[in-house]
Image (spheres, rainbow, N blue to C red):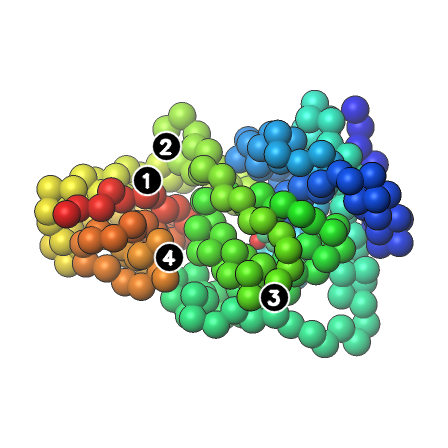
Amino acid sequence: MIAPILRDLATLREMTRGWHMAGETIGVVPTMGALHDGHLSLVAEAKKRADRVIVTIFVNPKQFNNPEDLENYPRTEEDDARKLERFGIDAIWAPNGDTMYPPGFATGVAVSGLTDVLCGAHRPGHFDGVATVVTKLFTQTAADLAFFGEKDFQQLQVVRRLARDLDLGVEVVGCPTIREIDGLAMSSRNLLLSDRARVRAPRLNEVMEEIAAGLAQGRTMSELTPSALKALENADFLSVDYLELRSCDTLALLETPTEPARLLAAAHLAGVRLIDNIDVPVVG
Ligand code: PAF
């Protein structure tokens, strides 16, 4: 079934009002398009959990701190709509820039604390842009449930916090990272990797798994990080924004996984910024 692509807010509102009046729940999968199997796994989960499913496609200028990055971001709407066909979703919400941010738009949503570290520290304003657009997407679509990948772990925590703090009444559902067969986390940005860089990219996940194995043996991040950085450099990752162990809940920095923890990394390979994170078992 081909889902209607909606660009007009009044039409979207009329549709969602009808669903709610019929007692149906609305599940939303927010995306910036260039859909891959990771996104599609969120759509499959949304179909299981909600009566109606909306996929949003909007490349949000407010979350790009680098104009070149925004310009290069893949835009593949027709292809995306085709990939969604088999799921039988109810609508694709793909507003244009002026519908999302009409002239004079002056409001922003900022989540403090959680956004001071990791990607927040390296991409100034990024999470303010994410928080603002996600808040708008939730209210525009009248979402009851919203589905996000754990691949963007910090984003997931930020969205959970804003949904709770602003009483948005949306249940935020985190779904596991989907990986290529060689371990590379699926991402729209993978499309930007050259053939040579694509071969090297899985090294990021391998190095992270090596650190996780070291932590499981009782070693510390201070002991494990230098050789991990060297291994990444050898694989052409020319700069590493962060490679850190953090508390799942608070994102506080950890030396060892003494509480539920996540190992998170962001690194640049041939001009493409890749991020990844893995769960690390608690060591007693
Ligand atoms: O994860 C993304 O694709 C984006 O950050 C999101 C959540 C759709 C907001 O623009």
Residue 283 screen position, x and y as percent = 17, 46
Tell me which label, 4 or 2, sits earlier in the chain.
2
Is disc 2 surrounded by few (<14), some (14 to 19) or many (20+) residues within 10 Å?
A: some
**Label 2 belongs to which residue?**
183
Q: Which residue type carries mark 2?
A: Gly
Q: Which of 84 and 231 is in front in this view?
A: 84
Q: Which residue is drawn at 70% across and 23% down?
A: 86
**Label 1 belongs to which residue?**
205
**Label 4 belongs to which residue?**
249
Q: Nearer the viewer, mark 4 or mark 1?
A: 4
**Label 3 belongs to which residue?**
166
Tell me which label, 3 or 4, sits earlier in the chain.
3
Q: Distance between the residues labelled 3 and 4?
A: 18 Å
Going by the image, does 65 lie left or right of 103? left
Q: Which of 86 and 46 is in front in this view?
A: 46
Q: Quick one: SS at disc 4?
A: loop
